[in-house]
Image: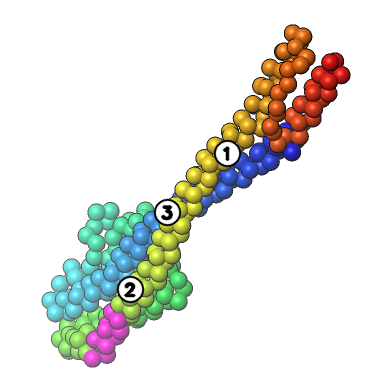
């Protein structure tokens, strides 16, 4: 092997090892970030699904309390909750989290803005078939809002007879069944999402483990390659050239009988050694 070919192969080997190390490092970092994002998304998903439940329960309580007490404050609470769910008004910055709390993902800053619950649901990083369950729960809660509005309207039209009709609606079997279906959908979504989340977490943890082992193996291989390269250069290039230089100095001083054995796998140095030996033979 010529010196030129050797150093070309050496360059390619080092370059490949560096590229492999860098690639595995970025894959490792990406997997770690994905795992962190997945954990943050889980917090957001669990929070938001809980907020849909909480706001639905709050609408039930405020509508019932208004009909029972005729206190307009509860009617205002009811309409404020609806407006916040729809994104018509902003959630107060330090408001108690009966609607939705600060999400720890990309939508973190939107919770105090005029952002509807429906829009926040659509921004969740969740498989489509599982997100559809939460969509269904939210749609059913929207339908329940219409029933609650109907009951409030009946009460406002007739504070006596309308009150009984409104309470019959808000405590009736159909209302309770619809409410139960909403809660069942939310629980179903949480259960299905958790199954998917744990599977994804396991996959990412395996990727991180594989990346760590691969990164360590490549680093050790890189160090081993450098050690082998050093020994190869010393044995086949550096030492032979040092011996040839010493021989050349002796020849220059008139010592033509001196000889040296050159052990090398480098063809260029082998040719140089033969040429010097031939020169010595011709002089002698």
Q: In this view, does 225 lie above or below 160?
A: above
Of mark 3 and mark 2, the one earlier in the sequence is 3
Under circle 1, the secondary element is helix
Mark pair 3, 2: CA separation: 24 Å
Q: Which of marks 1 and 2 is in front?
A: 1
Q: Is residue 226 above or below residue 180?
A: above
Residue 143 badge: none
Q: Mark 2 points at which residue?
A: 190
Q: Where in the figure is residue 189, as x and y percent of width and height? A: 35, 76
Residue 78 within the magenta-colored segment of the rendering = no
Q: Name the residue under label 3.
A: 32
Q: Name the residue under label 1.
A: 228
Q: Which residue is drawn at 30% across and 84% down?
A: 181
Mark pair 1, 2: CA separation: 56 Å
Q: Nearer the viewer, mark 3 or mark 2?
A: 3
Examine the image and state in which quarter residue 3 appears: top right
* In the image, farthest residue toward the bottom: 173
């Amino acid at each position: 092997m010529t010196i030129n070919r050797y150093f070309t192969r050496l360059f390619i080997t080092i370059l490949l090892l560096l590229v492999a190390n860098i690639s595995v490092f970025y894959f490792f970092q990406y997997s770690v970030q994905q795992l962190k994002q997945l954990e943050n998304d889980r917090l957001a998903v669990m929070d938001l699904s809980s907020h849909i439940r909480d706001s639905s329960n709050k609408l039930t309580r405020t509508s019932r309390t208004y009909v029972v007490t005729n206190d307009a404050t509860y009617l205002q609470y009811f309409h404020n909750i609806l407006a916040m769910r729809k994104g018509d008004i902003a959630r107060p910055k330090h408001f108690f989290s009966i609607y939705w709390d600060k999400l720890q993902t990309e939508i973190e800053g939107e919770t105090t803005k005029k952002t509807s619950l429906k829009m926040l649901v659509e921004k969740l990083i969740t498989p489509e078939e599982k997100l559809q369950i939460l969509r269904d729960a939210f749609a059913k809660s929207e339908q329940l809002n219409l029933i609650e509005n109907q009951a409030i309207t009946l009460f406002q039209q007739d504070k006596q007879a309308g009150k009984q009709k409104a309470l019959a609606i808000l405590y009736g079997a159909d209302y309770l069944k619809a409410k139960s279906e909403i809660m069942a959908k939310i629980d179903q979504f949480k259960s299905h999402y958790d199954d998917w989340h744990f599977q994804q977490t396991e996959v990412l943890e395996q990727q991180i483990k594989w990346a760590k082992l691969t990164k360590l193996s490549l680093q050790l291989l890189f160090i081993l390659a450098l050690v082998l390269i050093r020994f190869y250069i010393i044995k086949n290039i550096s030492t032979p050239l040092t011996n040839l230089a010493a021989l050349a100095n002796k020849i220059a001083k008139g010592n033509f009988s001196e000889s040296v054995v050159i052990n090398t796998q480098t063809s260029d140095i082998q040719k140089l050694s033969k040429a010097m030996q031939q020169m010595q033979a011709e002089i002698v």
